[in-house]
Image: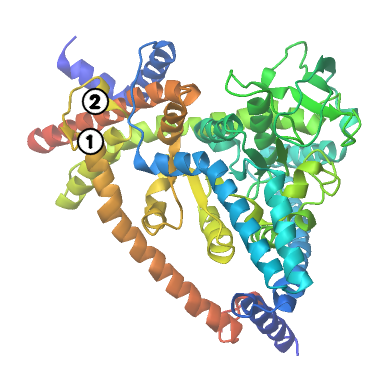
Amino acid sequence: MRAKLPMLICMVTGALLLLQFFVPHPFVQDTLLEWISNSAMIVGVFALAIGLASLLHMHGNKIKRRLPGWGFSVITLVTAAFVATIGLLKPAWGPTVAREQYVQCEPDLHGSIRTTRVVRVVHTLFGFDPQSSTTNVLIGAAIMPVRANRTPLYSWYFTYVHSALVSTTFCLLAFYMLTAAYRAMRIKSWEAALLMVAAVIVIIGQVPADQFVPLGHINGVSTFEWLKQLIMDYPNSAAKRSIIIGVALGGLATGIKILTGIERPYLGGGD
Amino acid sequence: MSARILAAIWRNYYRQIIYALLFGVILYASFYRGKITLRVSDMTLGVFNAVEAVPQQRARKIRTLEQELQTLRARQAGSTEVALVAAKLVRARHHSNGVILVSFDFAPDVSPELTPMAEAVVRHAFARGIRVVGIAAASAQGAPLAKTILENCAQNPRGLYPEQLSGTHYVYLGNRPDMFNTLMQMGKDMHATYETDYGGRALAGMPFMRGIKTFHDVDYLVVITGYVGVPETWMQIANTKYKAMIGMGMTAVSISGYMPYLQSKQITGLLPGLRGAAEYEIALGEPNVAVRRMVAQLFAHALVVFFIVVGNIEYLVRRRYGA
């Protein structure tokens, strides 16, 4: 029974999900689809709890046993707790102050609402006013009362800590890629030569190189750009298309095997 | 200094030298004030022209629905059928210049490449009086970023359009867990999927959303993404199932994987990374941050090609004369 029940659930759910693509009846398209979508979202939320438990278990163990790098685990857990806490705080508890400016607004040109007054909220960060954080809040149109005059701590953290760190880390890739290009792209065989020539064409074709070095034109397009498009349109697309079709057929076969119970990866095993 | 010493320095410190050169090149590009010209490619024009055509498309849609309604009334069709078409017509007339949905499916990691692209598309829509629905279908991390982008475009019009208001000219819905099912539900009823906007305002009472219920009420979808798999989900649901027109923008490194979809016309256009953003800005007649960043990219690419050549010369010399 322990093996058959999950199999049955999988088969029935899979069959129900497939129905929507073949049965145009309103019951299937509206009621059933909505029920399935809502159920999937609810199940998806449980993954969050499992993820959190897994994070605590893994890093907790590492700290407990003082394994190498346990200090990073402490940072991970403290940061996770901090971000989760500030995400739950009310926006009004945000530490950032905001300045409100009442300005007259032009009559609405396109919409049906006649906006008469607008409150412009300028978020300030230690006296610094980043223009991108300016917020308009409609009033007088019964949409919402003016209430947001603070930046929630979560938004502050996201913009000034998370975004900055992630962007910086990703941008460092340029440096690694440059050394990798220097070391790896060497003509050691004719296949490597082919790869290198294609790479150089695409790299040059992606930027307006003819601006500084005259490289000629083909059909009114700079030579490298034309060659790049040629590579992208034909050999690249042909290869990608075959991969896409291959993966789709493989996915179809695996899907049928899972639905019919031949493969049962959700039970922790293969067959 | 002899060649031998130089070679030894290069061998021991080539990483540091390459990093310093790249840093110098990017620094120089930041202060470079010369103009660069770019040809707007067909891939970019595919998205630009589709956004440009939204008001005409909406006018055609309204005319078609009016004719359909007249026909139904003339042949005294069932009240349900008439009511359905009448409701569609009311929604279509609500935003007479049309609506585009922009999905900001990226996180801060690829933001330097994709934010200019997203801004260019949103500014283009605002400049043509097209309403914008923003969502972050694939990324919870990208949700606050998308809000900033929309607000920045709305409140810094750069003389292209009047200041735009949230809830009147655009609405931002944020992120919901489980992208696949979110999109499936949006195709049926956006109000059921997103009960409130990102700021917590109920969509039910929002006049803007009276004109939008499903993907059919949106004239064009623009998906800007840095994730593999996200475009497929959009095409599978919005295009294949709900027949919505889609344009895409993605990081330059992912472009090669999606050329087949462009050729099969499942997407109308494809914005290739920063270059796509720069081309879009040029097509819009508002060269801005993406065009400026293209200078840095141009110099960095030149450096990459230079080091590929240097690496190969070094390899050939070593092979011939030994280490």
Total marks shown come to 2
Name the residue at 63% across, 80% down: A23
Q: Position of residue B265 (x, y in %)?
A: 41, 57
Q: Which mark is residue B37?
A: none
Q: In the image, is residue B260 above or below residue B21? A: below
For the residues labelled 2 and 1, say whether their Cβ atoms are less than 8 Å apart: yes
Q: Position of residue A52 (x, y in %)?
A: 76, 53
Q: In the image, is residue A162 above or below residue B70? A: above
Q: In the visual, does A119 lie left or right of B234?
A: right
Q: Amino acid at mark 2?
A: Asp
Name the residue at 37% across, 64% down: A243
- Front residue (pair A127, B5): A127
Q: Position of residue B81 (x, y in %)?
A: 73, 70
Q: Earlier in the sequence, mark 2 or mark 1?
A: 2
Q: Amino acid at mark 1?
A: Phe
Label 2, residues with CA under 10 Å away: few <14, some 14-19, many ≥20: some
- Marks 2 and 1 share the same chain: yes
Q: Which residue is mark 2?
A: A210
The secondary element bearing badge 2 is classed as: helix
Q: Give the quarter of the figure containing the C terminus of chain B.
A: top left
Q: Which mark is residue A224?
A: 1
As drawn, the residue found furthest toward the left would be B320
Label 1, residues with CA under 10 Å away: few <14, some 14-19, many ≥20: many
Identify the subunit bearing mark 2: A
Q: Position of residue A248 (x, y in %)?
A: 45, 70
The secondary element bearing badge 1 is classed as: helix
Whether residue B212 is visible to the viewer of this picture, yes or no, is no
- Front residue (pair B228, B244): B244
Name the residue at 61% across, 32% down: B126
Q: In the visual, does B139 lie left or right of A234?
A: right
- Front residue (pair B12, B59): B59
Q: In the image, is residue A148 above or below residue A264? A: above
